[in-house]
Amino acid sequence: MLSTRPFHHFSPYASFEYLNAHQDSNVQYGTSYLPTKGKEAIMAPHVMANFGLTYDNRHFFANATVHYTGPQSVTLVGDERIPGYITDTISLGYRFSPFLVAKSPTFRLNFTNLTGSMVRTGTTGVADNYHAVTLLNGQHIAGSSGAQFYVEPRFSMTGTISTSF
């Protein structure tokens, strides 16, 4: 992760992650095994990256981010994947001066998925396979319905009002 100290109240940052995760063994399926050894681990994208910009002048603050998640396997045998996707957020807020017993009244708005894109961001569970597979003992198993997915809401906005006493 790289970030800078504030320059005229702005602070850019970027982060990058690389993951190389594979399954070490075959998974038992009935009296045989699924051919999973060496396959990419499920829900383990190879690449994730974040880019953002923060602004803070002690009263007004804002943050904008773009997050990339690479493609990832969602079945044990690696025959179904979630494609890579991008999400974006913006947060805007204002810190008011202390007022009576409220020491730090703050108002914040959060906007998620500004582009309104429809993306699958995760799975509700693990599926063995999506297409027909030959087990290690030569037996064939039929394809399944595959994984079920979480979908990013097209756009959402939340707001908070908070303080300390």
Image: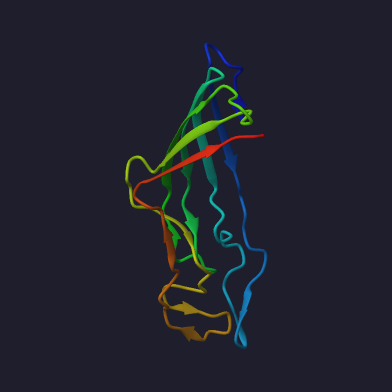
The x and y percentages for residue 93 are: 48, 29
Position of 40 relative to 97 (above/below) = below
Position of 161 relative to 82 (above/below) = above
Scheme of image coloration? rainbow
Q: Which residue is drawn at 55% across and 12% down?
A: 7
The x and y percentages for residue 14 are: 54, 29
Is residue 8 shown left or right of residue 152?
Answer: right
Quadrant of image for the N terminus: top right
Q: Which residue is drawn at 56% across and 61% down?
A: 42
The x and y percentages for residue 157 are: 40, 43
Q: Which residue is drawn at 47% across and 83% down?
A: 141
Seen from this angle, which residue lies furthest top?
Answer: 8
Q: Which of 37 and 94 is in front in this view?
A: 94
Is residue 124 shown left or right of residue 5?
Answer: left
Seen from this angle, which residue lies furthest front?
Answer: 100
Quadrant of image for the C terminus: top right
The x and y percentages for residue 112 are: 41, 43
Q: Residue at x 60, y 19 (%)?
A: 4
Position of 30 relative to 38 (above/below) = below
Q: Quadrant of residue 13?
A: top right
Q: In which quarter of the image is residue 105?
A: top right
Is residue 10 shown left or right of residue 112?
Answer: right
Q: Nearer the viewer, residue 36 or 152?
A: 152
Q: Which of 19 and 110 is in front in this view?
A: 110
Q: Which of 126 and 21 is in front in this view?
A: 126
Query: Count the marks: how many?
Result: 0
